Image (tube, rainbow, N blue to C red):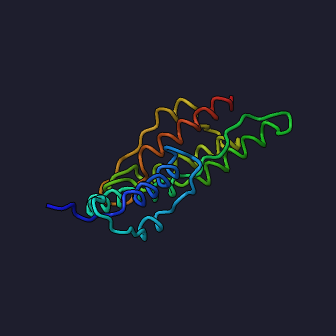
Amino acid sequence: MGMRSGYDPAEVDALIGRIESTLGRGSHTMEPVTADEVRGATFRAKRGGYQETAVDFALEAFVVALETQAMRPVRLAMAEPTGEMLREEWFETQAARVERVAFRPGRMGTGYNEDEVDAFLDRIVATLRGTTDYPVTAKEVREATFSTVMFRSGYLIADVDSFLADIAEVLDQRT
């Protein structure tokens, strides 16, 4: 029984190296790759090569990872105010950061209720700008809870929790 043909291992390994580099794993010296490039990838057949179905399934998973990475909210610098930036200007930049945040959609049709999260973020913005008589405390942000939704749009829970943890640190400095 002879060896069967499959995808050229060197070509597959080269693409996977680029994918891992793009995702922040492995060597960071390789050229980044997009999800569309992975979808369009073709490989020469080679005797003794990788099984096509296994590679195709693995590449589909990498496409999901690349698309997820591309949709992550941009994390803006949270540096503390310096002599060049007045304290209130710094809090204004943090308020603008809250206004611009974009959370990924929840997985499998579940996530935090978007209206509740948005209303809470509005309260945080008012607190950071000093335009409310009822400011939100860092403790309230850390203890915030939201309803979860199923089978309709909601924010990815991990994204919201992570962002609010950062904002709680900012509010610690507001007092």
Q: 69 or 43: nearer the eye? A: 43
> Where residue 24 sits in the image (x, y, percent)?
52, 46
Q: Residue at x 53, y 35 (%)?
A: 165
In this image, 110 relative to 10: left or right? left
Please say if 168 is above or below 60: above
Looking at this rendering, what residue extends furthest in the left direction? Answer: 1
Looking at this rendering, what residue extends furthest in the right direction? Answer: 84
Please say if 101 is above or below 78: below
Q: Residue at x 54, y 55 (%)?
A: 102
Please say if 99 is above or below 169: below
In this image, 14 relative to 134: left or right? left
> Where residue 4 sits in the image (x, y, percent)?
22, 63
Say which quadrant the N terminus sits in: bottom left
Q: Residue at x 59, y 49 (%)?
A: 29
Q: Quadrant of residue 167?
A: top right
Q: 128 or 74: nearer the eye? A: 74
Q: Residue at x 48, y 67 (%)?
A: 37
Q: What is the tally of numbered marks visible in this picture?
A: 0
Q: 35 or 79: nearer the eye? A: 35
Q: 36 or 104: nearer the eye? A: 36
> Where residue 141 sits in the image (x, y, percent)?
52, 36
Say which quadrant the C terminus sits in: top right
> Where residue 95 sits in the image (x, y, percent)?
66, 46
